[in-house]
Structures are given as structure tokens and as C-alpha cells.
Amino acid sequence: MADMNDKMNETNGSNDTMENLANDRKKLAELIFPNLKYTPEELEAKYPPRNLPGGEGAKVTRLGPSPTGFIHLGNLYGAFVDERLAHQSGGAFFLRIEDTDDKRYVEGAVETIIDSLGFFDINFDEGATKDGDVGSYGDYTQSHRGEIYAAFAKKLVEQGDAYPCFLTEDEISEIRAKQEAAKGNPGIYGEFAPYREVTADEAEKLIAEGKTYVIRLKSSGEPPAAKPAVQGDSGSAKTAAQGNPNSAKPAVQGDPNSAKAAVQDNPDSVKPATSEDSIDTESANNDSARFTVIDAIRGELSMPVNFQDTVILKTTGIPTYHFAHVVDDHLMRTTHVVRGEEWLPSLPIHVELFEKLGWELPIYCHTAQLMKIGDDGNKRKLSKRHDPELALDYYRKQGYHPAAVREYLLTILNSNFEEWRAENPTADIDEFEFTTEKMSNSGALFDLDKLNDVSKDVLLKIPATEIIEFLENWAKEFRPEVLGIFDDKDYLTKVIDLGRNDAKPRKDLIYAEQIVQFISYFFDDLYEDQSWIAAGSDLSKDNVGAAGSDTAEVGTTAENNLYPNEDFPAEVPTEDVPLILEKYLATYDHGDDQSQWFDKIREIATELGYAAKPKDFKKEPDKYKGHVGHVSTVIRVALMGRTQSPDVHTIQQILGEERTKERIGNHLR
């Protein structure tokens, strides 16, 4: 009986201790977060599960750029994945502005983000706009959601899963120094987290003394004893198309194929894993506890559980990215999170936050980095410093048509798209069934030359009137000095359509800057004064006269193509140039058909000692100065200032008789 009473007393004492601990946590939470606007329950009711046209299979995706003033190709790459997943499934795609890092905020960056994505026809169903929020799950700007984050941070403190940490910068530096000296794992955790068990009374005293604090996650993970390198497991790409395969995955032990995943302390960092002092990529131990998730691109991932007491609220009360995106993705009912693979090492933190808040994980889709072939012939990551094509603004300024960019992105997003396009050459791009199963997890190769080739094919399918409208809008923003070419739309339509409707259509048009330069010889102002080319064109020496011509080589310089007197064929002696042009003018009849016109050139060629056919010159080169093609090139250069172009006879018909004769005459003078 005595033993039973002792056990009952022990149980009662334990219960009292637990009750006292719970009361203290509640007191601590109230001390840190008094008089909040919302409770978690109220927020769950305010943002209920979505009722979408696609039903249970509908995907909800989001793009969450930071307003830093630089929007890059990776944003568009991810946005396109988001849009396809949502819109193909009858779901929703929204724009969320993730501006929790106030140190990197740039004025006007939000407008830049919206304008840049809008240019490429990225269509959001809801979210932030220049005129305010659209949708029922906002506010869609993280800096406006402070009361929401506070409600869930308070919940974590009440549960004993978060705590106020009063460590100073100097104290954190001392901890790091000790860890480095001991070759231990860096960060704030376990024995290096002195405020993990701070009581409400202790916290109240420290606050009264003016001590500042952050709120840290109180991780349940155990730090590993050693630091062997751990490799990522790409697994097989298994798509979570139905349901959520991550909702019932237990933690597992000892998978040697894990992704790297331990995070150091950096309360102000919202940068991904590559930022300095935010990630320790070698602190995971194969013997530590692990969890598994299904990544929709990479398949099954096994990773060490988080053991870091990561900052979730900064001293300002602003959340870190880790905490903000978890709260927002839950309340906005995001089902699929598409982001770059640089965020993989942060995944253990996010998984633990979802678990401690009692929420189902979204399906993560970690995309491969965008790569290019460097000068040394090896793959390398696209760089903001070295690769202007990384910035979305580059494509806007050069005037790539959004349809061309979207088409090209699908060629690098889904490995089967090009095969589909070959089988469905006229189908709308939205008819293609995009899937994460066909996405690369080893580095997506971005090739500007391939984009140009795709753009040629895409623009060929777009009517001239639509191309002209696109060009005019582009010119108003980036090239106002060329707006004169739009004065006569009928004339411009003939120019744009030159050769596009032939049995073997020409593909001369690539992007606005190149198109304007390519057709400039049809317009006297641009033809006679070509200083405008150098004024604003990064690519003025690429593809100008060579874009789609029959015999041109990519990379032919603008100088070589655009300036008369410099590019007559070497086979034509200088003294023959005026003779050819004089005879051409004397025999010119604007009413001649193609055959009659070329017969006259052939006659001029033979009169002056040139072979009537190229094959004759090739067979007996010593017998002739050159061949008829060299003679026609003299006429081409005199008319257009370049050695390569579409058919000269057709060009003359567009230029008109007066302008044709004037150009030849001017050259003679």
C-alpha cells in the first residue's frame, strides 16, 4: 500500500510539474505576445481550405520574389512551372511579395517584378498587384502580415517549441569560436542555447533590463557527434499528382544518400543555402535521426532532421523567411512549393516547423540550377555578374517575344516537349501536358543560341500585324528613335512578311532589336544614318544581316553588313563596281519579273568577264573574274549596304522604283 501511495504521489507530482511548466510557458507567451489581434483558430477560420474548379487534384502554387530590384531568369523559370501546375489542374497561382529582409528592399522593385512577369504573360489568379491585392487569402505582402506571424510564434512558445533568446552578437561570436576550436557543429543548439529553458520570470527581468531578443525555434533534433560529408539523394523523379505523399513519412535512420542540411545561426538572412554563415553543409551525421520526403522533381529525399534553434522572429518582430513561408503557405493553402535547389539544405527546418505547428507539408519541387556552357567548354551556373542574360530585363530590352521565351522555357523544363512540338507543330503551347516527372534534377542548360532558333520558329507562326504591334510597343519603351518605321503600317507589313509565306519560309526574325536592325535598309532614315544601332544595342554585331539569310554565318558583324563600300566581293575589282551599277541602272525595268530581272544581271556579268553560272567559275576559275553571284552581290550591297539579305528582286518591289534607282545612283555618285 505504501508503495502504491508513493507511486501516486510521484504521478501527482509529475502532473503538477507539467501543469506548472505549461502555465509558465503560457505566461511567457503572453509576456512576449500580449494583446494579439488574432488567435491561430481565428486565422484558420479566416483562411479555410480552398474550393477550386479542379477539385481534390487542384494544385495551388505561388511565386514569392523578394523586392531587391533584380528579377532574374530563375524567377520566370519557376513562375512558369507554378503557372503550368496550377492552371493545368484547375487550381490557383498567386503572387506573394516576400519582403521580410528589409535591408535588401529596393524602392519600386515590386512594380518591376509585376511589370517584368506581366511582359512574359505570367498570369496570376490572385495576389499582389500594382493596384492592391486581388484574392481572399491576402494580405499578399509579408511585411503586412506581422500579426499573423506573431499568432503562430506565440503558439510555438506556449507549446514549448520556441523561446526568446537574449544572446548578444558578441556572445554568439564567442559560441562560434568555441565550436570552431572544438571542431563542433556551428550554430545555436543544445548546450550552446542558454535560453532554451528560460522562464517567464527570467525573461521578464531581462526585458525590464532592456535586453533585446529574437524568437528561436526550440528544435527537437539532436546534434550529430561528427561531421562527415553527406551526399544528396536525387532518387527517382516521382510526381505527387494526387494527394500528398509527404504527410505520413516517418523519420528514418542511417541513409548514406542524404541531402546536406544543417543550418547555422543567422537571424537576418533570408538568402538560400549558398549565403555565407547560413548553412553548414557538413554537419550532418549518417547516424543521426533522419526524415524522408517525396520531392516532385527529385523523388524520395532522405535528410538529417534539423537540430538548430533557428531564428523565426528577429529582434524587430519581422519573421525570417523560414518561418514566414511556412505560415503563409499553410494559410494560403499552397499545395506545391516550387523553388531552386539551393533551398534544399533549409528543408529540415521547414519540415520541423510544419510538424510543430501541426500542419501538413506541401509538396516541394526543387528545380535544378540554370547552367550555361562557359568559355572553357564546361557547364557553370548562370551568374548575375558575368551573364547579362540572367536578368529578365535583358529579354525585355532586346525585345524577345513572350511566346518565344515561353516556348523555349518548356524545351528546358520538360524533356519531352520538343518531341511533342515536332508532332504538333501548330498546337497551342497550353495543350502540352507539363509534368514535374520530366524535369531535370541535374542542372538545366540555358542556351541563348537555342532560344534564338526557337524564337525564329515561333515568330514565323505569328501574323505580321501582331509582330508589328509588339515591335511598336517595344520601341516606345526602348527604341523611340525608330518609331518612324510605324508611320506606314501597310508598307511595314510587306517588309515583315518578306519571304515568310514562301514554300520554304524564311526565318529572319528573332527579337525586336535584331528585327529593326535587319529591316532598317527599307527605311531611308535608318539606312542613311546608322549611328542609332550602336546607341542602344548590346547585340548590334550579332545576327544583323545574318539572322535568317540563306548563306550568312551567325556572328557576322554589323559593320560588315551595314556599311556600303566595304563588302564588295574580293572577286570584283574596284573599277568594275561603277561599271556594274551603271549597266544595271541603264537596263533596269521595275516591271520585269524575277526571270527577266536576273537574265539582265547575267548579261552584265558575261559582258564584264564573269561566269554566267557559279559552277562554270568553279570548273574554270582562271577563265573568269568571278561569277554572276558576285555581280549580284555588288547590286545587293549598293541597295542595302549588306552582303546577305532576302531576294533582291522582291526587296526592290517593296522599295519601289524611285527608291531603288536613287540608291543605285547615290552609290555611283
Image (cartoon, rainbow, N blue to C red):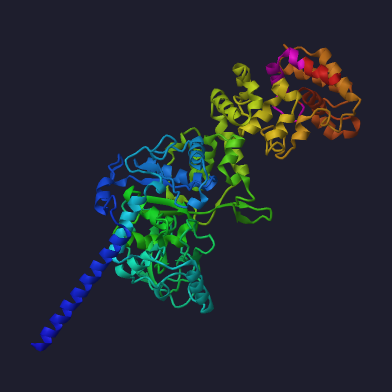
Q: Look at 63% across and 27% down and name the residue there.
A: 480
Verify whether residue 329 appears in magenta: no
Which image quarter: residue 557? top right
Residue 391 location, x and y as percent? 58, 44
For the stretch drawn in magenta, what is the main secondary structure?
helix
At x 47%, y 47%, the residue is 65
Residue range in magenta is: 641-660
| Residue 571 sits above or below residue 292 on the image | above
Magenta stretch: residue 658 in it?
yes
Judging depth in this view, the residue of 83 and 12 nearest the camera is 12
Q: Position of residue 402 (x, y in %)?
A: 53, 35
On screen, residue 379 above or below 410:
below
Whole-percent x, y for residue 377 in the image: 67, 55
Indicate the position of residue 504 as horizontal and vertical percent values.
Answer: 62, 29
Question: For the point 80% across and 18% down, which residue is it?
Answer: 664
Q: Is residue 155 left or right of residue 544?
A: left
Tell whether 135 sits left or right of 522: left
Q: Nearer the viewer, residue 315 or 292?
A: 315
**Residue 544 visible in the shown view:** no
Which is nearer the eye, 226 or 250?
226
Q: Quadrant of the C terminus?
A: top right
The quadrant of the image that shows the N terminus is: bottom left
Task: Report which quarter residue 646 is drawn in.
Answer: top right
